[in-house]
Amino acid sequence: MTDLSALIELVEHRIGQDFDGECHLTEAEARQIAAAIRDLTEWRDIATAPRDGREIILRRCKRVGAASWIEWPESASEEAGQGWTIGYDGDCWDGDKSPAHWLPLPSAPNQAKEAGE
């Protein structure tokens, strides 16, 4: 995925730069920005989702929610397993509820901006 912070800085730096009366981006810069927008807005096949424990957005039909992939060892009460879990409450996306697509979570908002600083 493209580093959006760097792209935002690039675009903000270009704002106000005047080249023959127009603000220009190179073709490579424009393609990079377009790719970053696609990364944020296009659902991906669940087979490509990260299974490293990070939280992502999952989707199946009308159901959408944040979840992460977990694996658990066998215990006295249940067999070992793995799956998409919602938080720590044990609710899983499995069986006929298995997700079909995913998106990365957006970056957290800047806390200083939220505090009005």
Image: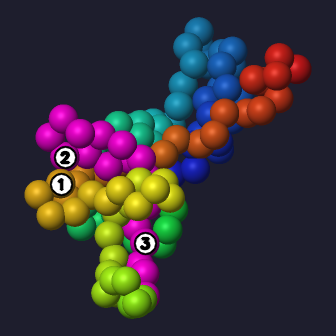
- Depth check: give the residue in front, 108 or 80: 80
Q: Is residue 96 above or below residue 24?
A: below
- The stretch of residues the image draws in magenta is 56-73
Say left or right for 50 vs 64: right
Residue 12 image-quadrant placement: top right
Q: Is residue 36 magenta?
A: no
CB within 8 Å, label 1 to label 2: yes
Circle 3 SS class: strand
Amino acid at the residue labelled 1:
Lys
Circle 2 SS class: strand
Residue identified by numbered label 2? 60
CB within 8 Å, label 3 to label 1: no
Residue at 83 percent of width and 17 percent of height: 116
Q: Residues within 10 Å of mark 3 (few under 14, many from 20)?
A: some
Q: Main secondary structure of the magenta part?
A: strand
Which mark is drawn over residue 97?
A: 1
Depth-wise, is mark 1 or mark 2 nearer the camera?
1
Amino acid at the residue labelled 3:
Ile
Residue identified by numbered label 3? 70
- Residue 96 location in percent, x, y? 11, 57
